[in-house]
Image (spheres, helix red, strand yellow):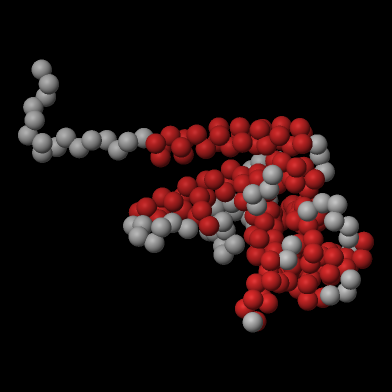
Amino acid sequence: MSVRYDVAIMARSDVQLMLEAKAGDDASFELLLQRYRTPLVSFLYRMVRDSATAEDLSQEVFIRVYRARAKYAPSAKFTTWLFRIATNLALNRIRDTRHRLLEISLDAPAEEHEPSMELPAREMRVDQLLLERDRAAVIRNAVESLPEKQRIAVLLHKYEDMDYVEIAKVLECSEAALKSLLFRAYETLRVQLAPLVAGAASPAPAETAGTGKGRPS
């Protein structure tokens, strides 16, 4: 019986949970927190590149959501509202501490909140592991070098799987402006990552030593 009850709770939509929290049900808000804490911390980490700061900002996001629950109206998706708050807080933190962030090496090793694409297959050999880490670092650095709004748009589109309408609302711009933003971002990444793609696509040179075949006449 308890299993069915738990499934029923998990099946409730974000809007339902937020409306229940608005009505005074703190358990519903706690479920929202559990549902989105990990993706929110991951997003914030990719923004600020510091685990402790990402944790602090995620707590501040949920505090703001909780304080604003009485004014909540389901006119937009809960995630849109959540990530808009997170984006604004992250940008403010970055701007306030830009002089410190410029000193942080972009070559620092990935931490626990890195996206799963950086985790290679279990059977991968050591040399392949190092290659994948290098590739992931190049991609990460390229994304981090994008202008702020382009970087946010790519993170929300690529890692949070948001559609254009949602991202436009988070960034408070038109859908057309967002598409232009993403086009410029992906074009920049395409150019910067072209050597990486070319290197991965290039076939290994064939070994001719010891074949016993003479040179073609």
Of all residues shown, which one is farthest toward the top? 217
Q: At x 76% / y 32%, what residue is drawn? A: 176
The answer to which of 30 and 58 lies nearer the viewer is: 30
Of all residues shown, which one is farthest toward the bottom? 1
Examine the rendering and report whether any part of residue 56 can be seen.
no
Residue 72: percent from left, percent from top: 88, 60
Q: Is residue 44 left or right of residue 21?
A: left
Taking 140 as reference, is 30 above or below it? below
Examine the rendering and report whether any part of residue 4 can be seen.
yes
Q: Quadrant of residue 213?
A: top left
Q: Is residue 174 left or right of residue 106?
A: right
Q: Is residue 102 left or right of residue 173?
A: left
Q: At x 66% / y 61%, what residue is drawn? A: 39
Of all residues shown, which one is farthest toward the right? 71
Taking 197 as reference, is 112 above or below it? below
Taking 128 as reference, is 187 above or below it? above
Q: At x 11% / y 24%, what residue is drawn? A: 215
Residue 50: percent from left, percent from top: 66, 61
